[in-house]
């Protein structure tokens, strides 16, 4: 249960992408809207033909519609991890009509390619087109990667204000691991816990154990997660064997999470200690 920074993966945009695809289909049926690309269409290669052949049908539509072009780029990035080819398709789509999703995808692949200045530009484009929580979060992660932690926190806060709870835990992580402000880290993890974020519980448990020397609270926030994504056996293994917390302290943690209003998630079963 070591706390780590959460990074947004490409699949978090699937829902919004699908919605855009549906809108695009409706528009095509009613108005036959067509766009003209100012960049040449990227070539369809043998690797794509073997591994993402179902997207071949989108290629013809991509001649005049940015959404299928973005879809092909998504396939290159998510299915093949071919970020250079994916970027070609995102740039091609953008040359027809810029969209928030396409810009966010381009930001993601450029981040994976460690071309951070370009990634920031595309993320900003996505935010300008549609200020969604994922793009704000992603821009925060780009700034984290280039060690501009105050800028990262700024964009994580904007993302959190729109309801993206992973941003709360990332702020906590930066304060904990990079800025060494443990009390501030605690407050941000607590905000995540109030939203029933498992990662918030996870972050607090590790913070109390490794930095704040409070094994009762460390135990409490770990025990509260039993029956969610963690089994009783795995939690007790971490507390007893990895952290070497005595059983009496673990029992106090159990009682704390059971009786305190600070825990919106509780484990009410028998620990067997």
Image (cartoon, grey):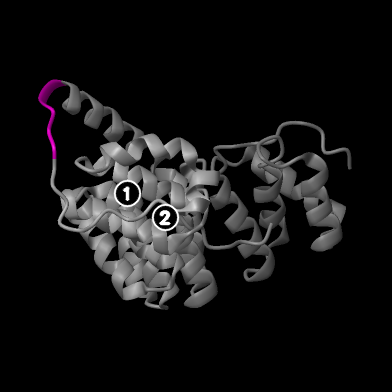
Residue at image point 60% right, 42% down: 260
Sequence order check: which comes first, mark 1 or mark 2? 1
Q: Residues within 10 Å of mark 2 (few under 14, many from 20)?
A: many
Q: Which residue is mark 1?
A: 133
Which residue shows up at 33% across the image and 41% down it?
59
Looking at this view, name the residue that lies furthest to the top.
30
What is the quadrant of the C terminus in the image? top right
Residue 268 in sight from this viewpoint: yes
From the viewer's side, name the closer residue of 59 and 189: 59
Q: Which segment did they paint magenta?
A: 30-34
Q: Position of residue 167 (x, y in %)?
A: 42, 55
| Helix, strand or loop at mark 1 | helix
Q: In the rendered structure, are the residues bearing label 1 and label 2 in contact, judged by CB atoms less than 8 Å apart?
A: yes
Q: What is the x, y in percent for residue 35?
A: 13, 43
Q: In this rendering, is residue 71 above or below 125?
A: above
Residue under numbered circle 2: 167
Residue sitting nearer the eye, 216 or 47: 47
190 left or right of 90?
Answer: right
Spot occupied by residue 15 in the image (x, y as percentages of width and height): 38, 35
């Amino acid at each position: 249960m070591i706390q780590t920074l959460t990074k947004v993966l490409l699949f978090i945009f699937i829902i919004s992408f699908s919605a855009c695809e549906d809108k695009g289909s409706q528009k095509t049926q009613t108005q036959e809207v067509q766009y003209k690309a100012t960049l040449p269409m990227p070539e369809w290669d043998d690797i794509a033909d073997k591994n993402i052949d179902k997207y071949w049908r989108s290629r013809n539509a991509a001649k005049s519609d940015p959404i299928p072009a973005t879809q092909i780029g998504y396939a290159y990035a998510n299915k093949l991890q071919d970020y250079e080819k994916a970027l070609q398709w995102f740039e091609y789509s953008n040359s027809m009509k810029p969209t928030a999703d396409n810009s966010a995808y381009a930001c993601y692949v450029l981040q994976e390619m460690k071309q951070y200045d370009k990634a920031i530009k595309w993320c900003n484009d996505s935010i300008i087109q549609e200020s969604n929580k994922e793009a704000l979060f992603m821009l925060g992660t780009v700034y984290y990667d280039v060690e501009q932690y105050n800028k990262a926190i700024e964009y994580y806060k904007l993302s959190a204000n729109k309801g993206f709870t992973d941003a709360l835990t990332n702020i906590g992580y930066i304060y904990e691991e990079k800025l060494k402000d443990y009390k501030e880290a605690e407050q941000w993890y607590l905000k995540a816990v109030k939203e029933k974020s498992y990662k918030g519980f996870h972050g607090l448990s590790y913070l109390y154990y490794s930095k704040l020397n409070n094994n009762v609270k460390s135990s409490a926030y770990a025990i509260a997660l039993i029956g969610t994504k963690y089994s009783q056996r795995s939690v007790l293994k971490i507390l007893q064997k990895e952290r070497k917390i005595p059983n009496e302290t673990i029992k106090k943690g159990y009682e704390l999470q059971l009786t305190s209003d600070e825990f919106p998630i509780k484990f009410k079963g028998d620990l067997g200690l």
